[in-house]
Amino acid sequence: MGRVTRVVSVGPGRLGKWLDGFGVRHGVLRYEVMPESVTVSAEDGSTAVVTVPFEPLDVLSREGLLAHVLVERRVGVLLVRRGGYGAGVFAGGKLLASKVGARHVQGTTKAGGWSQQRYARRRDNQAREAFAAATEVAVRVLVPARLDVLVCGGDRRAIETVLEDPRLKELAGLVRPPFLGVADPKQKVLEQAGVDALAIRITVDQPE
């Protein structure tokens, strides 16, 4: 018999009910609690590995995990791609402050020779301008917010470029997983990213 693995996302307030349901479906549960993850093993051989958000977990128990995920934190979200950027501050599941923007970055071209080089230089300049705009938004929206944690998403190299700015040094030290894969950051994308940043990720492995 094979096994099936899948990843589910659960809101912080639903984690306890999800674990109870896992026990109902799969039998008696045993918990192995570590600072970075909690492995739940069921009677039928199924397992659920809970990735501890904003690790480490200080109280190594089920109750400690449930309390940890419900702690209200000021969470910053920074999304940067070549075509756009967004920054938001979330607390208690609510968006307190945000700013999104877009900058045109020219696509690739099939032209060769000098034309190709000219397009490449123009594209690089446009990307630098977009990243500079994203940096200014991060400075205005995120730096004054007294964040507990920062979650990033979009393009990793773009995020690294933005966080290299000396004004964002303290902010860079607050970065925690997950890294969010997002489309070009518009307001609704940013709002969903705030939900995704707080979601608990659980890897479920069970017999077919």
Image (cartoon, rainbow, N blue to C red):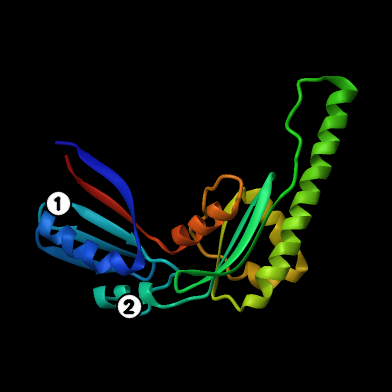
Q: Amino acid at mark 2?
A: Ala
Q: Looking at the image, can residue 149 be seen?
A: yes
Q: Residues within 10 Å of mark 1 (few under 14, many from 20)?
A: few
Q: Residue furthest right?
A: 114
In the picture, measured across the screen, residue 121 lies left or right of residue 6, that is right
Pointer 1 or 2: first along the chain: 1
Q: Residue at x 54, y 48 (%)?
A: 182
Q: Of 35 and 136, which appears nearest the observer?
A: 136
- Image vertical order of residue 101 relative to residue 12, above or below: above
Element at badge 2? helix
Which numbered tag is attached to residue 134?
none
Instruction: Locate the C terminus and report the quarter of the image it occupies.
Output: top left
Give the amino acid type for the residue marked by disc 1 in the picture.
Gly
What residue does disc 2 label? 67
Q: Position of residue 130 (x, y in %)?
A: 76, 50
On the rendered structure, is 43 left or right of 167?
Answer: left
From the image, tell me which residue sits under label 1.
Answer: 45
Q: Residue 6's quadrant in the figure?
A: top left
Q: Residue at x 64, y 70 (%)?
A: 171
**Residue 91, position as x, y percentages in the image:** 50, 74
Residue 191 picture location, percent across and down: 52, 59
Compared to 44, does 3 lie above or below? above
